[in-house]
Amino acid sequence: MLCAMKDDYLKAILTAPVYDVAEETPLEPAPALSARLGNSVWLKREDLQPVFSFKLRGAYNKMVQLSSEERERGVIAASAGNHAQGVALSAARLGIEALIVMPKTTPEIKVKAVAARGAQVELAGNSYDDAATHARMLAEERGLTFIHPYDDAQVIAGQGTVAMELLRQHPGGLDAVFVPVGGGGLIAGVASYIKALMPEVKVIGVEPEDAPCMYEAIRAGERVELPQVGIFADGVAVRRVGAEPFRLRKYIDEVLLVSTDEICAAIKDIFEDTRSIAEPAGALGVAGMKKYIEREGLKGAELACIDSGANMNFDRLRHVAERAELGECREAVLAVTIPERPGSFLQFCEMLGNRNITEFNYRYADARDAHIFVGVQLAGGREQKEALIAELQANEYPLLDLSDNEMAKLHLRYMVGGRAEAADERLLRFEFPERPGALLRFLSRLSGRWNISLFHYRNHGAAYGRVLCGIQVPEGELQAFEQFLEQLGYPWWEEADNPAYQLFLR
């Protein structure tokens, strides 16, 4: 429900009683990120709230102002998790019964957190919009008050208290503030407050490329409903921006879109400076800031990013770690064709020189060409990747750049392989100390004596490198090969009798 305060957000924000439950979160410097980007970067740590998200502010500000009759009937909310936790905690503090409808795709950590705070949870649909439709139906049937996560003036005013703290905590003045955007409640409150007091400060929204509801609405000049949204950044997976946040878009300077890889890189950036793990939506501000700095060639600016939440599913971390290097352009993923002959792997690695190989996947296909899937660590970003590609092409290595190929990054890297009729193949699993150049030294010791028919290696940041290797060893050379393994000095295991090998690789 919108109220008369919508045209007086400054007063509403200043008087919002959110600190009955919310904390004033710190504005912390990000020294490593600042040094790398050449700007002063500050993180507004909303991930440190009792529910690990800013959403508590708006939910409580709405619910504390309900009438006694509305409190008696109870409340209902639809949420992918963070708003749900805010409503649940607020309801517990105010003695109100709460029902939360969550999408079936909501991370389990968020579902459990809501239930642990005493709210009843019901799962419905596969997106926020599906859950919201179901929640509104239940609200009408049972006479419950619907607590909207973003399209409500009192909720927006509660979220605006983030900006009130931010400006007070950085009295020297900011050049820009980067705000995650889903339905638009946070940026509406933040932008309304900042533009009322310091209109020269840019307020820049950031959305995922696969959930650009505010971006598309601004471009169209009206609220549009996206046919579908990605759910990696589930906290902002909204198909249509709220009516009131859209009305307040006049206070937003622009909205930037970032990729999943860029979000993963931002999660890593935040971790390296704070040792905390932001959820994907929480890292949007940092991802957008980096893109803005690169686009504008910005130096010496004072920039703040709202780290909006930390409700991350643990099993999602493997995907984040896998994609962060690509998002920062610190890894190139290439498909390279090399000659199918002994020593060609070593020759290729020697050409790469001191560059660290992060991944090397290959399976024998024919007697002429070998197609390898290779990851190479980059220190110089896109320019270094372009230089590497140019060098490979100059040395007559046909290649494809797969660094932005979603299918290759999600699936192909795990599928390189398959059955092959590689004569005299022995399948061995090796471990070797993981240090720069370790893979090159491993290949050097093979020294081109035997043909490699299968190779799988991925640097996972562990103390030991792990390689699965198929080597074609004619029967007359078995003794020499055994001597080689002994001189190699690395732990190894024979896998030729492994039923997985027999089933999928022979």
Image (spheres, rainbow, N blue to C red):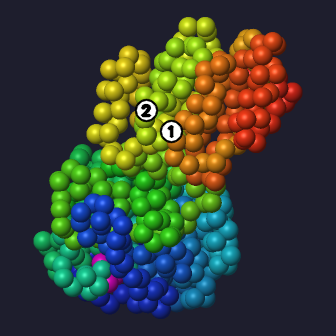
Q: Could you say where residue 260 lies in the image, as x and y percent from the top left?
A: 44, 47
Amino acid on which disc 1 is placed = Ile
- Picture quarter with the N terminus: bottom left
- Taking depth in this image into account, of 410 and 227 the one nearest to the observer is 410
The residue under label 1 is 357
CB of mark 2 within 8 Å of CB of mark 1? yes
Please say if 82 is above or below 356.
Answer: below
Element type at mark 1: strand
The residue at 29%/85% (across/down) is 169
Q: Is residue 203 above or below residue 296?
A: below
Q: Residue at x 64, y 65 (%)?
A: 109
Left or right, residue 285 beside residue 326: left
Q: What stretch is highlighted in magenta?
A: 161-165
Q: Is mark 2 on a helix, strand or loop?
A: helix
Q: Name the residue under label 2.
A: 352
Query: Residue drawn 72% across and 13% down?
Result: 422
